[in-house]
Amino acid sequence: MKELLIAFFACLVIGAMINGANETTNKSGNDTGSAAESGTQSYEPAGEIIAPTAETSDAHFEQDVLASQVPVLVDFSAKWCRPCQKMSPIVDQVAKEYSGKVKVYKVDIDSNPETKSRFNISSIPTFMVFKNGNQAESHSGAVPKDKLVALINRHINQ
């Protein structure tokens, strides 16, 4: 329960930071628009609708992730987590763009407590790359798409 509360509050803080970065105000304090309107980077995908990324579970994690012949990016998240919600379309884009090179799965930590515990997930979103059945690298917190892609690229064809 303590870990869940810590993860919840971490999510709230990160969500507030992301929202603060995505909204701009002028010197008088009036809202000048969203990040997309102001020309800064947005977490929303542009253009076509992309299918959601596949999910895995406690029961299928071994088969889906650890037994994979290609690198796997796992997005540990929760439905109630705002930073996770912001990252979801980015993860979906990456899954589509890297189809055939990398597998991408989402793990809902609330529905999969064994996997959450096994990999000591205490902050969400957490992204882990697995290669040859082993955890190769991880990052906690929301990131721009280019940083998520860089995380994956370090483990392709090595």
Image (tube, rainbow, N blue to C red):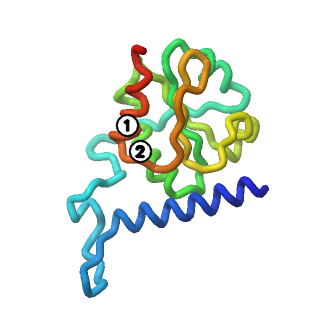
Task: Determine which of the numbered discs, if any, sits on residue 93 in the image.
Answer: 1
Seen at 53% across and 12% down, the residue is 69
* Quadrant where the C terminus is found in the figure: top left
Residue 27 in the image: above or below residue 95: below
Is residue 50 found left or right of 12 in the rendered image? Answer: left
- Tags 2 and 1 in contact by the CB under 8 Å rule? yes
Q: Nearer the viewer, residue 36 or 50?
A: 36
Q: Residues within 10 Å of mark 2 (few under 14, many from 20)?
A: many
Q: Residue 6's x, y, as percent?
A: 68, 58
Q: Residue 133's x, y, as percent?
A: 61, 18
Is residue 130 found left or right of 30 in the rendered image? Answer: right
Specify the amino acid type for callout 2: Pro
Is residue 86 found left or right of 22 in the rendered image? Answer: right
Residue 129 in the image: above or below residue 26: above
Q: Secondary structure at mark 1?
A: helix
Specify the amino acid type for callout 1: Gln
Seen at 50% across and 30% down, the residue is 73
**Spatial separation of the CA atoms under disc 2 and disc 1:** 6 Å
Q: Secondary structure at mark 2?
A: helix
Q: Residues within 10 Å of mark 1 (few under 14, many from 20)?
A: some
Residue 37 in the image: above or below residue 53: below
Q: Residue 22's x, y, as percent?
A: 34, 63
Seen at 65% across and 18% down, the residue is 63
Residue identifier under label 2 = 89
